[in-house]
Image (spheres, rainbow, N blue to C red):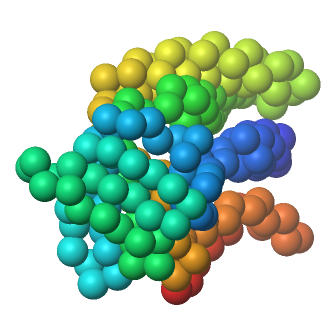
Amino acid sequence: MTRISFFVAALVLVGAATARAQQIAGNFDQLRVLVASGDTLTVTDVSGARMQGKVTQLSASALVLDVSGALRQFDAANVMSIEKRGTDSLKNGALTGFAIGGVLGGLAIGAAVAGDMGADGSTAAYALGGALVYGGIGAGIGAGIDAIIEGRRVIYASSNSPTTRLTVRPVFNGKRTGVLLSLRLTR
């Protein structure tokens, strides 16, 4: 059983190391790389009001949107976040699918082989093989799901915006093994 626990912890570590948050612009200069004239954006100002329109101008200090035929200027100091509609990245879906499929496949194959053959050295090899096969299937399913998802993603957040951080760590403490999840929200 300790080999399976170690294997699961190793998969969690690999998944946690590869899962990274998408980078977002912290100022309007960085935003210029992500936005082109004519793109549709949703701006949330410091009061919480949301406005959607097409980009007509973007400078280091201001963004001008065409909102239903009227030009509306947003100064960088008054914008909390900007969202852009687009497709979801296939990478995070493939990684999530691989992790889920790999863990479930490895555990299922490892448990089945250990029950039939007894716990010997070949159990880990079968579990690894099952993890890779079912991880590949899960990656394909995750990428397929992400390919059909279209939604808004934050492309700009001011330094005053709240941030969320999720940390995943394996825990090895004597006879116990597990995973520590930590969620932190800062403003």
For this view, does 121 lie left or right of residue 153?
A: right
Q: Position of residue 10 (x, y in %)?
A: 80, 43
Q: Position of residue 53 (x, y in %)?
A: 22, 49
Q: Residue at image x 10%, y 48%? A: 69
Q: Nearer the viewer, residue 99 or 30?
A: 30
Q: Nearer the viewer, residue 107 or 158?
A: 158
Task: Locate the N terminus by quadrant.
Answer: top right
Q: Residue at image x 47%, y 22%? A: 143
Q: Residue at image x 26%, y 78%? A: 48
Q: Is residue 16 visible?
A: yes
Q: Residue at image x 67%, y 24%? A: 131
For this view, does 48 lie left or right of residue 120?
A: left
Count of numbered marks: 0
For this view, does 99 lie left or right of residue 5?
A: left
Residue lying farthest left?
Answer: 68
Q: Is residue 134 visible?
A: no
Q: Quadrant of residue 70?
A: bottom left
Q: Position of residue 104 (x, y in %)?
A: 56, 33
Q: Position of residue 5 (x, y in %)?
A: 75, 48
For this view, does 17 lie left or right of residue 182?
A: right
Q: Quadrant of residue 85?
A: top left
